[in-house]
Image (cartoon, helix red, strand yellow):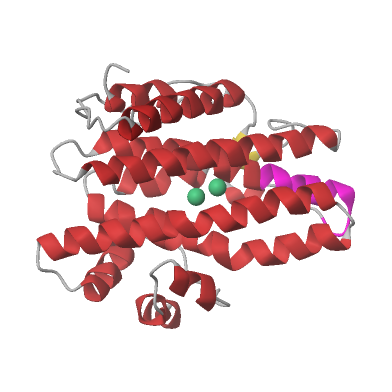
Amino acid sequence: MESLRAAACEVLGTADARAKTALSRRHAAAWAELREAGAAPPLGRATPPEFPARPDSPKLLDPRDVPRRRPGTLAGRIAILHAIAHIELNAVDLHWDMVARFPDVPVPPGFADDWVKAADEESKHFNLLADRLEALGSHYGALPAHAGMWRAAADTADDIEGRLAVVPMVLEARGLDVTPGMIDLFAKAGDTETVAALEIIYAEEVAHVAYGSKWFHFLCGRHDHDPKDRFHELVRRYFHGALKPPFNVEKRAEAGMPPDFYWPLAAEK
Ligand SMILES: [Fe+2]
Ligand SMILES: [Fe+2]
């Protein structure tokens, strides 16, 4: 591996979804091997693209124009899987972008370890869901997808604390809130293989939120900022949606997100 940031940019520059996740997993394995051998290779410097490369399909639509389907039907469940697969692919790029984007902020090697591991897991999640879509007679790219996914990254391209607040601590924490309901929906439909895939995703996503909270607190500590106040300030500045209850208070707490971080933001929207 030439440098980790160059590897990150290579993933970001790969358009085909399966090729992106395969390369992501290869780079993550190479990094883990170096680190296990006791090496702390320099992260290097490389310029991530403004927008990551993506396949020609799915077509990206404004969320209002993405057709809704009834969740009680097979078509509805395929649409849900497609939407989650799209989120996972976006998450692969988000985590590699986290590795590449902020070379002037000094961080310990564990910062890269965490985001490389998260990127590897998102790649696995995408593959699991793409496999399920194919088993159900569809595929990733068969339906239109949400166009606004990179906005959180673009808005926080110059602010690592803002990025940590919005991506893992708001968006990925939201995943913890909604995944149990999705697991129930596929369980009711008797789709045990999709349930198994979603259970893996649910278990691993807790750590991604925890990485966010850990490094957010680390950077707040460096600047002597109160983490809770700083989180509220940055979410108000960069996040344009609403923080919607019900919250998964237990998993959020496990991930280092106590209620006083998110309740005040939910109440004001
Ligand atoms: Fe994921
Ligand atoms: Fe994640």
Judged by its main secondary structure, the magenta piece is helix
The quadrant of the picture occupied by the C terminus is bottom left
* Residue at x 41% of width, y 46% of height: 151
Instruction: Say above or below: 257 vs 101.
Output: below
Residue 146, given in percent of the width and then of the height, sits at 58, 44
Residue 69, given in percent of the width and then of the height, sits at 80, 53
| Occupied quadrant, residue 85 | top right
Residue lying farthest to the left in this orientation:
223
- Residue 5 shown left or right of residue 95 in the figure: left
- Span shown in magenta: 70-83
The front one of 89 and 200 is 200
- Residue 51 shown left or right of residue 204 in the figure: left
| Occupied quadrant, residue 143 | top right
* Residue at x 27% of width, y 60% of height: 216
Instruction: Say above or below: 175 vs 230.
Output: above
* Residue at x 43% of width, y 59% of height: 209
The front one of 191 and 147 is 191
Residue 228, given in percent of the width and then of the height, sits at 26, 75
| Numbered marks: total | 0
- Residue 123 shown left or right of residue 218 in the figure: right
The quadrant of the picture occupied by the N terminus is top left
* Residue at x 39% of width, y 38% of height: 116
In this orientation, does residue 61 appear?
no
Magenta highlight on residue 71: yes
